[in-house]
């Protein structure tokens, strides 16, 4: 046990990511609840608008991202609930683990869960709302990845902040929703272009906005997370 | 054991250490020095500030006023290095409920950079008498088993360890667990690790520790 080489930032992040995914695997009931919540959200939108298939198809991108955003609140809250139990996050801090590695690992884990959820929702969208993939699966996959990362970075940061408060379940959406609007707008617009076609070649602009949002908030998360998790 | 330039520095130096939660001062102006490798029994009634003091020294929380040095390392400036050299056995186990005992220890071992993390984790679980349940999620552990797993996690830290902070280490343990804890404390002391032991089992603590500090309403008092 003498020659110890503590992991660097990326290896530490990978260990935290692996730990979070392992916990999710052990508690699959929570993943199922997340999935059914997102599916129920899509169904409610579908029932609320009635049988107007044209309207459903036009707004399908918005419904998809709202379902992912609402489900993300559950996933993000859960991500820090497991850290509060037995003061596990204190355990990581005192080990010590680089807090930036903790942020990267947890944010990537949350993004992976949201991306997995979106992959299940897409076939449901195709069946329920009658959408077609005019620009192909590759473009949609890229939007889903960027959109999930864009929710996950500020979501993880704010979830860490909210987890210290008493009204944490209310605090997280209050903090996250106003901030996420540019990313949500870009993801919805880009997804709608994938469903309906892109005659004006607007897709790249929305992808650039999503990319810029990601760069900003992943950077902010890495920079600010150490202050957030210290007292 | 310790090869830092401050190898001769005391294990703990507290200067005017104070901690406020809201309007309540949990600790007020504590001064104390503990020599390297020495052992301190921390006593006091419930709410006297024992746990707060241990959490401050471990850097789990920050002081409102005053200074803490552990082995010459400043609790604010050198926080990361101090954490490497300090172990805290707390009321909270720091374990993930949905991971198994072994997975918890392997994770900690890998994050500490211990080569062959799996075998290190297994041997420590065996040492604390948990090998037969190491494949079960911590959620299914009894309070005593959680304490044993937390002890195993603490033992991952040597050889860098210079200070072990033990908050009610005998709590929830059965007689064999208490005997194990006493053996481990003796081993740590024999290896030059300073010990701070907070407990209401004063007689047991006195038998293990050379120094004593009594707290009353956040201040050092006569026992």
Image (cartoon, coloured by chain):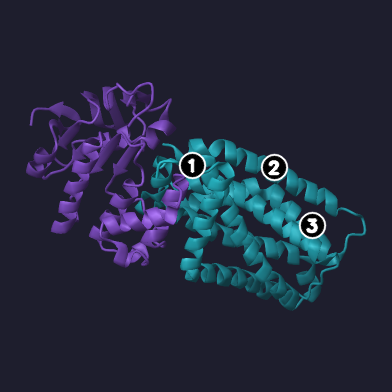
Closer to the eye: label 2 or 1: 1
- Residue B55 image-quadrant placement: top left
Colour in which the image shows chain A: cyan
Question: Is disc 1 placed on a helix, strand or loop?
Answer: loop
For residue A130, above or below residue B25: below
Q: Residue at x 30, y 31 (%)?
A: B20
Q: What quarter of the picture does the N terminus of chain B occupy? A: top left
Numbered circle sitting on residue A6: 1
Pinpoint residue A175: horizontal percent, then vertical percent: 56, 46
Q: Position of residue A101 (x, y in %)?
A: 54, 44
Q: Is residue A133 left or right of residue B117?
A: right
The residue positioned 37% from the left and 65% from the top of the image is B137
Pointer 2 residue: A215
Q: Are marks 3 and 1 on the same chain?
A: yes
Q: Is residue A173 visible?
A: no
Q: Is residue A126 visible?
A: yes
Q: According to the rendering, which colour does chain B have? A: purple
Distance from Cα at disc 2 to Cα at disc 1:
27 Å
**Residue at horizontal 49%, vertical 46%?**
A160
């Amino acid at each position: 046990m003498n020659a110890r080489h503590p992991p660097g930032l990326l290896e530490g992040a990978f260990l935290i990511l692996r730990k979070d995914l392992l916990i999710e695997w052990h508690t699959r009931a929570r993943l199922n609840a997340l999935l059914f919540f997102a599916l129920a959200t899509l169904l409610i939108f579908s029932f609320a608008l009635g049988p107007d298939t044209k309207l459903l198809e036009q707004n399908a991108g918005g419904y998809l991202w709202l379902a992912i955003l609402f489900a993300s609140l559950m996933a993000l809250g859960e991500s820090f609930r497991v850290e509060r139990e037995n003061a596990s996050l204190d355990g990581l801090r005192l080990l010590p683990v680089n807090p930036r590695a903790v942020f990267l690992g947890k944010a990537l884990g949350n993004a992976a869960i949201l991306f997995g959820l979106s992959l299940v929702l897409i076939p449901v969208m195709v069946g329920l709302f009658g959408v077609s993939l005019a620009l192909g699966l590759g473009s949609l996959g890229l939007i889903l990845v960027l959109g999930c990362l864009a929710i996950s970075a500020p979501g993880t940061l704010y979830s860490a902040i909210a987890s210290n408060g008493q009204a944490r379940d209310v605090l997280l959406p209050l903090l996250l929703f106003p901030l996420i609007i540019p990313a949500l707008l870009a993801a919805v617009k880009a997804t709608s272009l994938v469903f309906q076609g892109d005659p004006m070649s607007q897709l790249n602009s929305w992808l650039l906005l999503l990319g810029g949002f990601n760069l900003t908030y992943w950077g902010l998360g890495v920079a600010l997370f150490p202050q957030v998790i210290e007292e | 054991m310790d090869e830092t330039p401050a190898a001769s520095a005391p294990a703990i130096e507290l200067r005017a250490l104070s901690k406020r939660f809201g309007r309540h001062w949990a600790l007020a102006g504590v001064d104390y020095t503990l020599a390297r490798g020495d052992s301190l029994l921390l006593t006091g009634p419930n709410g006297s500030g024992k746990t707060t003091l241990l959490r401050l020294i471990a850097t789990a929380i920050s002081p409102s006023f005053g200074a803490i040095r552990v082995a010459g390392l400043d609790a604010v400036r050198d926080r990361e290095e101090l954490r490497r050299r300090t172990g805290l056995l707390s009321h909270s186990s720091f374990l993930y409920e949905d991971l198994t005992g072994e997975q918890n220890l392997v994770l900690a071992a890998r994050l500490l950079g211990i080569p062959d993390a799996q075998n290190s984790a297994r041997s420590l679980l065996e040492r604390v008498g948990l090998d037969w349940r190491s494949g079960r999620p911590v959620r299914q552990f009894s309070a005593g088993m959680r304490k044993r797993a937390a002890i195993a996690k603490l033992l991952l830290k040597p050889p860098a360890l210079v200070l072990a902070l033990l908050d009610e280490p005998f709590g929830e343990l059965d007689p064999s667990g208490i005997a194990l804890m006493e053996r481990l404390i003796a081993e740590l002391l024999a290896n030059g690790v300073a010990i701070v032991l907070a407990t209401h089992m004063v007689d047991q603590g006195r038998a293990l520790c050379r120094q004593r500090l009594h707290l009353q309403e956040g201040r050092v008092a006569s026992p």
